[in-house]
Amino acid sequence: MVKVNVMKEMTGIIEEKTIEPEQFCEYIGNTIKVHGSIYKIRKMSGFAFVLLRTKRDIIQCVYGEEFSSFSLSEIVEECCVIITADVVKEERSKTGVELRLVDVEVLSRPVMESPIVINNKKVDTSIENLLNYRPITLRNEKERAIFKIQEGLCQAFRTYLTMQRFTEIHTPKIVYAGAEGGANIFQLDYFGKKAYLAQSPQFYKQMMVGVYERVFEIAPVFRAEKHDTSRHINEYTSVDFEMGYIQSFEDIMQMETGLIQYAMRYLEDEYHYELELLKVKLPKVSEIPTIRFMEAKELIANEYHREMKDYEDFEPEEEKLLCEAIKKKTGSEFIFVTHYPTKKRPFYAFEDPEDQEVTLSFDLLFRGLEVTTGGQRIHNYDMQVAKMKERGMTVESFESYLMMHKYGMPPHGGLGLGLERFTSKLLLQDNVRLSTLFPRDINRVTP
């Protein structure tokens, strides 16, 4: 953040005007004020380069004995300061200017030296240290760039869905029953009653289709996963949307294709700085190829001479191999896998009228990992009740959920996209925790 004093001509009142670093060139020949944290000091003979970390940029400033009115010893790395600097034209600089330090006001200084070196190009430490010292390691230029890109994805998703006439909603995270059931649900003592942390906004976003027709939410969800792997965390950010009056579950896949296409263009336009810093190669997204679940299993078995063991889901290695095979055949780094077995999908999944052993559902795989699950939902009351009874569910326990079916619902469907997984694969990381601000897994609840 940059501040320059501007005198109002008529009133004589001095006010502070804030400008961005890319506007430095407008102030060549002027003295400006800049606030930030001292990121790094490179001492030379008679002068020094002082790198200032601002909210988005790392700005190179020059300290010189002939023009700086303070001693270099007054500042240390991670000092929070307001600097006064002369703006001098310098074509070799990224900003086109050089900031020559004139004076400094120290707002605060660290009381201890950082246990982790954060001002190199990369934080060279273990993932455990990276996460244990998260409030500090996130100050690294590349570490924080990860979450600026994640911000960009959220901005793009929100903008695109709004343009497609979706309404943003905010659903409860304390619920009476799990949307997907199973053992991976956190139970709470809710004033003497059983309650749970939401695995998904599924029930509520379906209900809201009956209100707004198209809805979305970007919010945390909770899974009591007991797996300690590079792909599992127990709290993540889910990008959910649900849309009514669909003609086919393919409408949902088409909407997601447009969503991802828009997001990639948005990142290219608005987050070029971070993309270049992290050397990100954005995937080309035209039409995303589609393959049925069993066809995908057979392709993997034939292409890689693997025995097919699990007939209801993919093994992690199969997801990687399928993406590898599809990329070779089509060039796409995305693949929609459709028609998952009915046994594997939740009770609200719409079964294929032509083959009730499979559902009108899909997963989206990206660079070897499932990042989205979606599909068409049952909208007919009698059909939904019949399927619940078939699965041995207590229908009375879901009375508030079934209310929407009882009083009329259009054909509808939607999806949930894992934001951290998507970010991780976009950045070619090998662990989803690297794209999780403060990860929660089976071993970690701090910081």
Image (tube, rainbow, N blue to C red):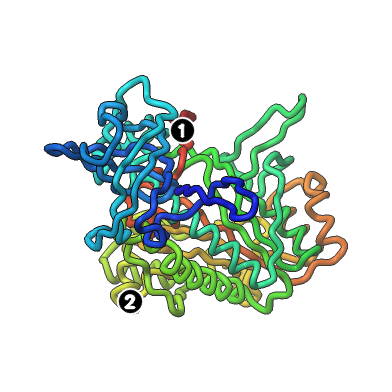
At label 1, which amino acid type do we have? Answer: Ile
- Locate residue 139, reporting x and y percent: 38, 39
Q: How many marks?
A: 2
Closer to the N terminus: mark 1 or mark 2? 2
Q: Which residue is mark 2?
A: 331
Q: Residue at 40% of width from left, 59% of height from top?
A: 22
Left or right: residue 64 versus residue 195 is left
Residue 119's disc number: none
Pinpoint residue 133: horizontal percent, then vertical percent: 37, 30
> Which residue lies most toward the right here?
407
Among all residues in the image, which is located at the extreme left?
Answer: 45
Above or below, 222 relative to 276: above
Q: Secondary structure at mark 1?
A: loop
Would you call the spot at circle 1 few (<14 residues within 10 Å), some (14-19), or many (20 or more)?
some
Can you see residue 87?
yes
Q: Quadrant of residue 108?
A: top left
Residue identified by numbered label 1? 442
Q: Residues within 10 Å of mark 2 (few under 14, many from 20)?
A: some
Of 205 and 405, the residue lying toward us: 205
| Residue sitting farthest toward the top | 111
Across and down, in percent, residue 307 comes to 31, 61
| Residue 359: image location, x then y, percent | 59, 67
Position of residue 423 in the picture relative to residue 301 (left or right) = right
Query: For the residues marked 1 and 2, what is the alpha-carbon distance in whole angstroms?
Result: 37 Å
Q: Residue at x 26, y 27 (%)?
A: 73
Between residues 297 and 259, which one lies in front from this camera angle? 259
Q: Identify which amino acid the numbered label 2 is placed on.
A: Gly
Judge by depth and name the residue closer to the eye, 372 or 106: 106
Numbered disc 2: secondary structure = loop
Is residue 246 depicted above or below 106 in this figure?
below
